[in-house]
Image (cartoon, rainbow, N blue to C red):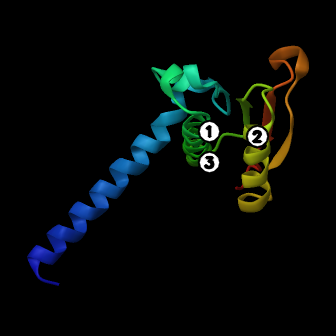
Amino acid sequence: IIPEQLNDILQKQKEEQNQIDKLKEFISKYKTDEKSAVIDMHIWEITENSNKLSPSEIFNIQISFFNKCLESALLNKLSNVVFIHGVGNGILKKEIRLTLAKDYPEIKVFDASMAKYGVGATEIQIPFNY
């Protein structure tokens, strides 16, 4: 490997590590303790000017946000995460649960505590060795 190629490889590795570090940091403001987080996914909590968005834009933003939070939770080795999605017509809840079942079958998924979060929340438990 010539020095230019080595520099390119090192630069790419540094950029990738920076992206991982940013993603890892993403969930920090939602953490309730070292191993848990509670994330409110209502659109007004995750973006500004939500009143100008179409329903499909809102859904896409929320799903993207969910995926980013989940990846961050996995990088941080969290064991318990609650996603507050609201009741609505159930499309967001359904998509979250389909994604988890399809892509992360080892993660346990269930309704979060109604007493704590109301009806519209999904709780996940991530195995310690995930």
Q: Nearer the viewer, residue 10 or 30?
A: 30
Measured as percent of width and height from the top left, residue 91 is found at: 76, 40
Residue placed under numbered mark 3 in the picture: 74
Q: Are marks 1 and 2 in contact (CB under 8 Å)?
A: yes
Element class at badge 1: helix
Q: Nearer the viewer, residue 41 or 22?
A: 41
Element class at badge 3: helix
Rendering quarter of residue 121: top right
Q: Amino acid at mark 2?
A: Ile
Give the Cα separation between the discs numbered 3 and 1.
22 Å
Q: Residues within 10 Å of mark 3 (few under 14, many from 20)?
A: some
In the visual, does 90 lie left or right of 71? right
Q: Amino acid at mark 1?
A: Phe
Q: Is residue 15 above or below residue 41?
A: below
Residue placed under numbered mark 2 in the picture: 91
Residue placed under numbered mark 1 in the picture: 59
